[in-house]
Image: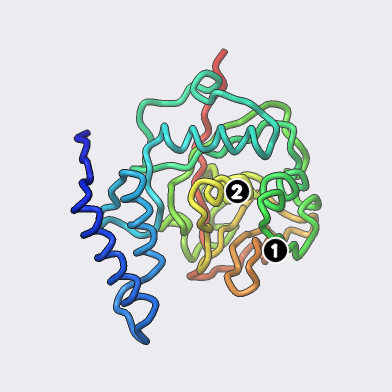
Amino acid sequence: MATHVVTGEQTVKISNRLAEIQRQVFLQKEYGHDPEKLIEHLQAAIEGRFIGNGSAKSVGQNLDWWLAKTEEFAEKHLGVRVNLRERFAIPAELPWESAIPVFDPGALTNRGMVDFALRAQGLAVWEEEDVMKYAGSEAGEAPTLHFINNSVTPDDDTMNLSPNDLRATKKSFLRLRGYGLAFAVYYFATGKYLDPKTFTWFPEDRLPGGSVAHGAWDPARREVRFYWGCAGYRSSDGGARVAMPVSLKP
């Protein structure tokens, strides 16, 4: 990649343009562009990245970048130092243009995920029902790695499907603990949130009575929220996230 040196004259020119942008964004009563998106592009420029005109659904980066961020997150918040490429048989190609790694060290319960992955980063968490009451809440027997599509919203083809509909597809979907870990890594890496306008079902995470867990970010209350709903309920705002498992290396 070419290296561009900013000269003194160019620095002044850029500073003047940024001052004008700031005046338009923060002083005018009306502005025709999203200030948050503008800030995202400016930050990308500072880091030497370019954000194209593609989908605004995700914050794109290459897989090595996401793996490095996940490893950094795991060491800082989960107390686990791991080299994901050395530990897992990561395929050369994934079914998505950009993917979020979801690493579970194997010793976390749902409660541990809430405490160490989310709350430890200053994220408030609300539980309609204790997250330890859902199926799959206990710690696993070994570390796991999954990939999900790098998207703020659930997978398009799952929207408006009920948990029972989703289960009938026989696909492997992200579970409650994995969602919390994915949310935490996404926030750690980008400072942004999953599902600010949608919610994600976890079809296999069910209460003893059959109700199903789902999660989202509530912008008004500024908290990650874990709800439950009926297994047959559908909503155009709700879907699920296919989770691609990656095997451990021998």
Tell me the quarter of the picture where residue 214 sits.
bottom right
Q: Amino acid at mark 1?
A: Trp
Q: Residues within 10 Å of mark 1 (few under 14, many from 20)?
A: many
Lateral position of residue 42 relative to residue 228, left or right: left
Q: How many marks?
A: 2
Which dot marks residue 184? 2
Q: Nearer the viewer, residue 88 or 83?
A: 83
Element on which disc 1 rests: strand
Name the residue carrying label 1.
Answer: 228
Residue 222 placed where, x, y %?
Answer: 63, 68
Tell me the quarter of the picture where residue 16 sits.
bottom left
Question: Which residue is pictured at 35% across the width and 49% down the height?
Answer: 46
The C terminus appears in which quarter of the rendering?
top right
Lateral position of residue 129 relative to residue 99, left or right: right
The N terminus appears in which quarter of the rendering?
top left
Q: Amino acid at mark 2?
A: Ala
Q: Nearer the viewer, residue 217 or 74?
A: 74
Tell me: residue 122, above or below residue 101.
below
Element on which disc 2 rests: helix
Are circles 2 and 1 on residues that touch, CB within 8 Å? Answer: no
Residue 6 placed where, x, y %?
Answer: 23, 46
Residue 219 placed where, x, y %?
Answer: 57, 70
The Cα–Cα distance between marks 2 and 1, rounded to whole angstroms, is: 20 Å
Q: Nearer the viewer, residue 18 or 72?
A: 18
Question: Which residue is pictured at 78% across the width and 61% down the height?
Answer: 129
- Most distant residue in the front direction: 8
Residue 221 placed where, x, y %?
Answer: 65, 72
- Most distant residue in the top direction: 250
Q: Nearer the viewer, residue 119 or 235?
A: 119
Question: Which residue is pictured at 67% across the width and 66% down the height?
Answer: 230
Image coloring type? rainbow
Tell me: residue 20, above or below residue 152.
below
